[in-house]
Image: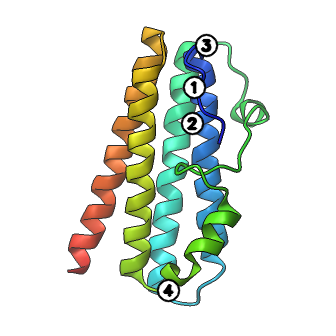
Amino acid sequence: MTPLRGDETPQEVIVIAYGMEQGLADFYSRVLGMTGDQEVKKIIERLRQLEENHKDRLFGLYQSLEPATPAKALFEEKIVAGAMEGGFTGEEFLEKNRPLLDTVENLLSLAMMLEAQALDLYTRYAQKVEGVQSRSALHAIAEEEKGHLAALGGLMEARA
């Protein structure tokens, strides 16, 4: 993953974040096809949907900064997906963690790790960028990651 330089505009920050969210959504889609366990599939689909919801939030944030933003499909043409929130490509992460994708508990733990890494990443980037708007955008994204962590924690508690 390309680290932020520190002088990105809020729009550039959102585009980078959107790409990471897309990378993780794509990863979850790949994992979905790897299991026959219906409970695991249900959790993976929920995680994938969280990433899609986050992309919608990011797109809305982008539109608030750029009112003349074209349709979402045209916006997505700018996106470079591949790196997930933790900085891995989906393939790298899948190969390294395939054994941990076999149970719901392991899957939830893995997802929580990714979301915690994303929270840390966005928080660190917020400290690095110079512009107030960029910093604010990163803080907003970090808050979304906290929401993802809370949702995953709720799923774990429900299983206990």
Answer with mark 4 or mark 3, whichever residue precedes in sequence.
Answer: 3
Please, what secondary structure does the residue beneath circle 1 have? helix
Point 44% across, 74% down: residue: 107
Please, what secondary structure does the residue beneath circle 2 have? helix
* Residue at numbered disc 4: 102
Q: Which of the two residues, 141 or 128, is positioned nearer the viewer here?
A: 128
Q: Which quarter of the picture shows residue 55?
A: top right
On screen, residue 56 versus residue 157, left or right, reads right
Answer with mark 1 or mark 4, whichever residue precedes in sequence.
Answer: 1
The amino acid on which the numbered mark 4 sits, given as a three-letter code, is: Asp
Cα–Cα span, label 1 and label 3: 17 Å
The amino acid on which the numbered mark 3 sits, given as a three-letter code, is: Pro
Answer with mark 1 or mark 3, whichever residue precedes in sequence.
Answer: 1
* Residue at numbered disc 2: 17
Answer with mark 4 or mark 2, whichever residue precedes in sequence.
Answer: 2
Q: Which mark is residue 67?
A: 3
Label 3 near label 4: C-beta < 8 Å? no
* Residue at numbered disc 1: 13
Q: Which of the two residues, 129 or 38, is positioned nearer the viewer here?
A: 129
Q: Position of residue 100 (x, y in %)?
A: 49, 80
The amino acid on which the numbered mark 1 sits, given as a three-letter code, is: Val
Point 63% across, 71% down: residue: 94
